Image (cartoon, coloured by chain):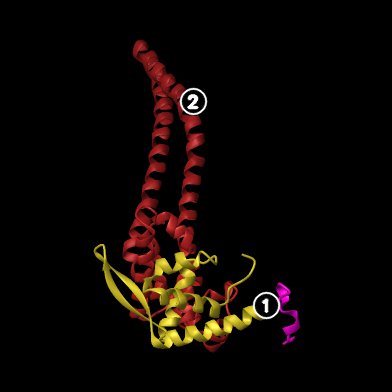
Amino acid sequence: MGFSINAGLLDAMVLSIVQQNDTYGYEITQYLRKAVDISESTLYPVLRRLQKGELLETYDKEYMGRNRRYYRLTERGAASLEEYREEWRSHKKKVDSILLNEGVENNEQA
Amino acid sequence: MNKLEFLTKMRNRLEKFGLPQDDINDALSYYEEVFLDAGFGKEEETAAELGDPVEIADGILRDSGIHTADASQFPPRFDETQVQNTANPNGGSSKSNENFWLKFILLILTFPIWLPIIITLFALLFALMVTVVAIVAALIISGIAFIITGVYTVIDVPPVGILMIGIGLMITGLFVIIGSPTLRKIIPACGSLIRGLVDWIRGLFAKRGGQKNV
């Protein structure tokens, strides 16, 4: 991957994964790995941050005789995710206009 | 490194810098889960993938605003960490200083344990050297004594005198053949053994001293 992923984008992707269904740390990493090179140790601070900001909440569920920590999107998290998505759409459009020469006539040169 | 080693290293590091117990448990249960979810018999692999437990712990500490003593050796990851570093510049170093003094005091307090051990080691070595020297000296002295008494006795009782001279020559010969080369090798060997022991003890202290940087 030649492009770096910043913290905001990582937060947004984690929120989106959790929105699909409640899930646990390891699965989130596996999911993210489809798009970015990330390790469990990178994910931990992200999850902590989202939890502290009350965008995610956790609950424990038994799995094979042990507890597994599941993450669930809060209302605040869902709202934040929508903001992220909107921001991403406009960001993507701007980047595409330059990188892929798309919609040159709409290029605002911001 | 297996799961237990990994988690222990992390816990030690987090406890050392005083992260609240709740946060420690939260982090450790997360990483334990990672190991468990990665599957049985893949502990070494998972640990290698995760990286250095001490560095991970340092990252968690940084995120909680705790400055670790040797964090300056690594380039700060984000700008915000730099702000945190300047916020409490000597938070970590005073802690490591305390640690050094703690170790120093511990070293003094435990001297009834390590002092006798060192003395015993030196005493054993010394005894070994003395024994070897004594045996060799006994060989020479008894050999020469046999020859001298043999010479005197040969006048009075020739057969006994000749026998004694013979024994004396044999013993002296034994010394020349076996004793002197052994002695020539053993004395330097003892010297290097003592030097090795001294170096080892010095190394032990150096290691203790070096830990103040951790």
Q: Specify the quadrant of the image occupied by residue B71.
A: bottom right
Tint of chain A: yellow
Q: Is residue B95 above or below residue B33?
A: below
Q: Specify the quadrant of the image occupied by residue B143.
A: top left
The span picked out in magenta is: A97-110
Which residue type carries mark 1? Val
- Residue plotted at (67% across, 77% down): A95
Q: Could you say which is closer to the camera, residue B140 or residue B109?
A: B109
Helix, strand or loop at mark 2: helix
Residue B176 numbered mark, or none? 2
Q: Could you say which is closer to the camera, residue A32 or residue A106?
A: A106
Instruction: Give neighbour class at mark 2: few <14, some 14-19, many 20+ (Cα, 10 Å).
Output: some
- Residue A4 on the magenta segment: no
State if disc 2 and disc 1 touch (CB < 8 Å).
Answer: no
Does residue B155 show up?
no
Helix, strand or loop at mark 1: helix
Percent across and percent down for residue B157 are 34, 13
Question: Which residue in the protein does label 1 denote?
Answer: A95
Tint of chain B: red
Count of all numbered marks drawn on residues in the image: 2
